[in-house]
Image (cartoon, coloured by chain):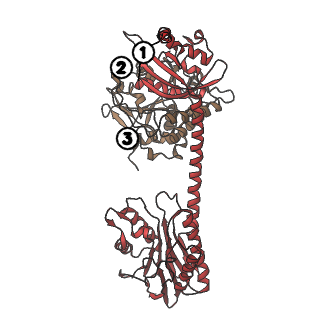
Amino acid sequence: MPDVLTRNNVVVAGPPGARPIVFAHGFGCDQHMWRLVAPAFEDRYRTVVFDYVGAGASDVSAYDPERYGSLRGYARDVLEIAEALDLRDAVFVGHSVSAMVGVLAAAADRSRLGALVLIGPSPRYIDDDGYVGGFAQADIEGLLASLDSNYLGWSSAMAPVIMGNPDRPELGAELTASFCRTDPEIQRRFARVTFLSDNRDDLATVELPTLVLQCTDDVIAPDAVGEYVHERIPGSRFVKLRAVGHCPNLSAPEETVAAIKAFLGER
Amino acid sequence: MTTTPPDAAFYEALVVDDATELYEHAPCAYLSTLPDGTIVKANATFSAWTGFDRAEVVGCRRFQDLLAPGDRIFFETHYAPLLRLQGHVREIAVELVGRDGARLPVLVNAVVRAGEGGAPPLVRAVLFDATERRAYERELLEARRKAEESERRALTLARTLQESFLPPAVLDVPGLDVAGAFRPAGDGSEVGGDFYDVFDTGRGTTAVVLGDVCGKGAGAAVLTSLARATVRAEALRTPSPGAVLQGVHEAMVRFHPDRFLTAVLLSVRSTSTGVRLTAAVGGHDLPLRMSAGGHVDTIGTPGTILGMIERARLTDTTVALAPGDVVVLVTDGVTEARRGRELFGFDGLAATVRAYRGCSAQELADAIITAALEVQDGQARDDMAVVVVRVPS
């Protein structure tokens, strides 16, 4: 068994023994997506951030096309991390495609996760016989073409550069050009798995307290989709954020943090 | 070089091309947006390219609304996070969808300008027409895909071909325990020249051959096929291993005068009274033998490389094998495995054979490959082939 914590570049903070909260990034980038959110929980929670195999600073050599050919492979990453850290009653915060990864992980092993926070969830991105996901099959082909065109500009030979950001000192200087850069083949596969999967039937399996966070004007996960998720997960709570777009963890971290804390019974 | 004073046209241009004129009619589109993409300002070039009047976009459309759906996903999952976290993006390729639905491939560079005095930050984007470039890139991509596809096919071909040079690992020979193992160099993308074969001669003996053709690739594959086929054909004609290798030698000299190979051929006869083995060696390392008691020696008489010189010298040597005896044939990929100055060599081979005393032929064959790989830190620099013949005790 390879060292899971290294494989997934797991970073843990906060007091040992506190309730764990796991932040899972979506398609496109890596754990840096949480840098404006996770620290707000470090006082009272054991925070866990990580990169899925194939993303960020994970061990790319551990990428197995068969395992990661389904979101269940990504759910295994989550459960293996939870096992390696022996997490119990963990809050799982999943952004974008990770929302469904959390749903699958919760169903696969009921002993690790205690609550789900789904940010911009979508159980199916493609429209289907009365269901509105927001995209057509051809659009996903368009995304793959878009990924291809952008990899040409992002040569793998390009050296990582440390990028300071004088205008936004809160971001620090350690963020490198590797952010949002992934092996093109892996990225393509992840895009397919993400945007072609259909997890509508898995929603009903959720038995954990669940919060659905819906953004305003989210082209990737429109209102109707968030409401669909809320309706299908028994007893879930639905909160509409003022934050616009698909990444409230970056564009409106305070609002996102407040919504999660309110759900967890904190002020 | 002489300097002429600026003429009237120069002064005219200087006055006309002021900052506003440059902004509006620059050979690129300018777009200023709020962090959520809402368009705040756009230049005349942008309007000309997209067909949208300024009034149709400013304040009421977001940058991502003007992109093809696939690009919109890319925008949300890459462009927006990058802008938020690193404050700029460079050379993002997207397609603008114009008023009439026509698509214009553009490259986008953007920076975030911090708002002053509590004002929200502003994103300044510059868009370059990339129609030609994108068409060319698509061709490049297509070419790369084709190249990868043919590489995959070549790899499959190489592996299939290589497999055809090797019989199944475990070989059913009455009265003997015979097994082989093979490991290609590197990723196995090239056909190597190592081969082995085990077959019934129809004369109450089992022939075991292991050889190494010089070179790699298609040329070596042709030679390997020829050598294997010739060994099989000659072995039906003559019981003498030396005479069989002589036949291979002559075929090489005749059909491939510039190529050569090394080989060991064993003819093993197992009867109720015991096992007798006759070996001929053409330019190859002598077979290693270990007795049940762990004594190691070699069998056979060194002979000339096949196909190298006009007259080959190949000698049959016959020995009796006792129960528990093990005979090991390897190619030089095994004995020449090295890490720096540390060579696996005959000693490494002998040590491995001793360490696996009492094990099956297959276990020993696999162990030899593993040990030789370990010396090279897991990276086989040359093909490695092993055949083990064990007399059950």
- Disc 3 crowd, CA 10 A, few/some/many (<14, 14-19, 20+): few
User: What amino acid is found at the position of numbered circle 1 in the picture?
Assistant: Pro
* Residue occupied by mark 2: A167
Residue B88 occupies quadrant: top left
Spot the residue most to the bottom: B273
Q: Mark 1 lies on which chain?
A: B
User: What amino acid is found at the position of numbered circle 2 in the picture?
Assistant: Asp
What quarter of the picture does the C terminus of chain B occupy? bottom left
| Figure colour of chain B | red
Q: Establish whether labels 3 and 2 are both on one chain.
A: yes
User: What amino acid is found at the position of numbered circle 3 in the picture?
Assistant: Asp
Q: Mark 2 lies on which chain?
A: A
Say left or right for B375 vs B182: left
Residue at image position (50%, 91%) is: B273
Measure how far apart labels 3 and 2 are at the Cα level: 40 Å
| Nearer to me, B366 or A211 | B366
Q: Which chain is brown?
A: A
* Residue occupied by mark 1: B121
Mark 3 residue element: loop
Spot the residue most to the front: B2
Choose mark 3 or mark 2, whichever is in front.
2
Residue B262 in view, yes or no: yes
Residue B354 occupies quadrant: bottom left
* Residue occupied by mark 3: A86
Mark 2 residue element: loop
Residue B354 marker: none
